[in-house]
Image: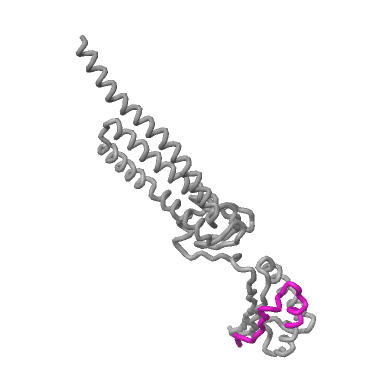
Amino acid sequence: MEQIIEQAKIILMQYGLKIVGALVILIVGFWASKKIKKITVKLLKKTTIDVTIINYIANIAYATLITFVVIFSLQNLGVDTTSFMAVLGAAGLAIGLALKDSLSNFAAGVLLLIFRYFKLGDFIEVGGTSGIVDEISIFYTKLKTPDNKVIYVPNSGLLSGNLTNYSAEDKRRVDLVFGIGYDDDIDKAKQAIWDEINKNDKILKDPAPVVALIELADSSVNFNVRPWCRTSDYWAVYSDLTEALKKRFDAEGINIPYPQTDVHLHQVGA
C-alpha cells in the first residue's frame, strides 16, 4: 500500500509540474501576445498604412502567436504535436483551396490599402464600371454611380485590369471638338471660342487653354478646344462651355454642320 502511495506521489509530482508549467506558458504567452499586438498597432499607426489593414495585421499576428503558445504548452505536457501540426497544415491547405477567391480578394484589399491607388470620394473606372468610391473593405470596394446605383467590385478585379482614377490629380483637361461650316470664317470662329473661354472663371490660366484647327472633315472644319480646370469643376466647364459656344455661334451666324443625306428621286417613264 505504501509503495502504491509513493508511486502515486511520484506520478503526481511529475505530471503536476508539467501541468503547472503548461499553465504558466499559457498565461505568460497570452499576456505577451496581447502586449505584442498592442505594440504592433501602436507602431503601425505611426505609418501611413490604413487603420483597417493595421487591425487585420495585428489580429493575424495575435492569432499566430496564440497558436505557437498552445503548441508549446502541449509539448510541455509531453503531447506529441507532430501529428497535430500535420492535421493543422492539412486543414489550412483545405481551407485555403476552398477560400481561394476570398483569399485573392483579401490579398488585393491589403495591396489597395497599402499602396492607396484611390481613396474615399475618388471617381474611378475599372472593367467598364465607373463610380465614386464609397467604401473600401478588405474583400470588396463599394462604388456609387452618378445615378445613385451601388456596385460592389471584388478587390481582385480592381488589380487584374486597368484602373483609371479621375480624381487623382487636382487639375483636369476638358477635351471638346467644335465644327464649323466650310463657308464660315475660321478666324471669326476662333475668336468667338477664345472669348467664351476667357469669360468662364472656372477655366484656369495655367496650364493655358488650347484652341487649334485639327481636321478638315467631310462636312465641317473641326477645332480642338482644350481648357484646363479644377477636377471638381470638370463637368461644369464641359457643359457650360458647350452651351456658351452654341449660343455664341448662333449669335455670330456661324454654322454648326450636322450629318445630312440628300435623296434624289428620279421618275422613270412608263
Nearer-the-camera pick, 232 or 170: 170
Q: Quadrant of residue 197?
A: bottom right
Residue name at image x 59 percent, y 66 percent: 168
Residue under the point 34% across and 30% down: 21
How does the figure colour the protein chain or chains? one colour
Q: Residue furthest top?
A: 1
- Residue 104 part of the magenta-drawn span: no
Q: Residue 183 or 226: which is nearer the viewer?
A: 226
Q: Which percent across, then down, holds residue 245? A: 73, 78
- Does residue 69 sit above or below 114 in this rendering? above
The vertical placement of 191 against 30, above or below, is below
Q: Is residue 195 left or right of residue 64?
A: right
Q: Position of residue 105 (x, y in %)?
A: 45, 52
> In the image, is 88 to the left or to the right of 161?
left
Q: Which residues are magenta?
A: 194-217
Q: Quadrant of residue 129?
A: bottom right
Name the residue at 25% across, 34% down.
80
Place of residue 75 in the rendered image (x, y in percent of width and height, measured from the top left): 29, 35
Label count reads 0
Q: Is residue 189 left or right of residue 107?
A: right
Q: What residue do we see at 63% from left, 84% from top?
A: 219
User: Which residue of the protein is positioned furthest toward the right in this rendering?
Assistant: 251
Q: Is residue 74 above or below residue 140?
A: above
Q: Residue 132: x percent and y percent?
A: 60, 58
Q: Quadrant of the C terminus?
A: bottom right
Q: Quadrant of the N terminus?
A: top left
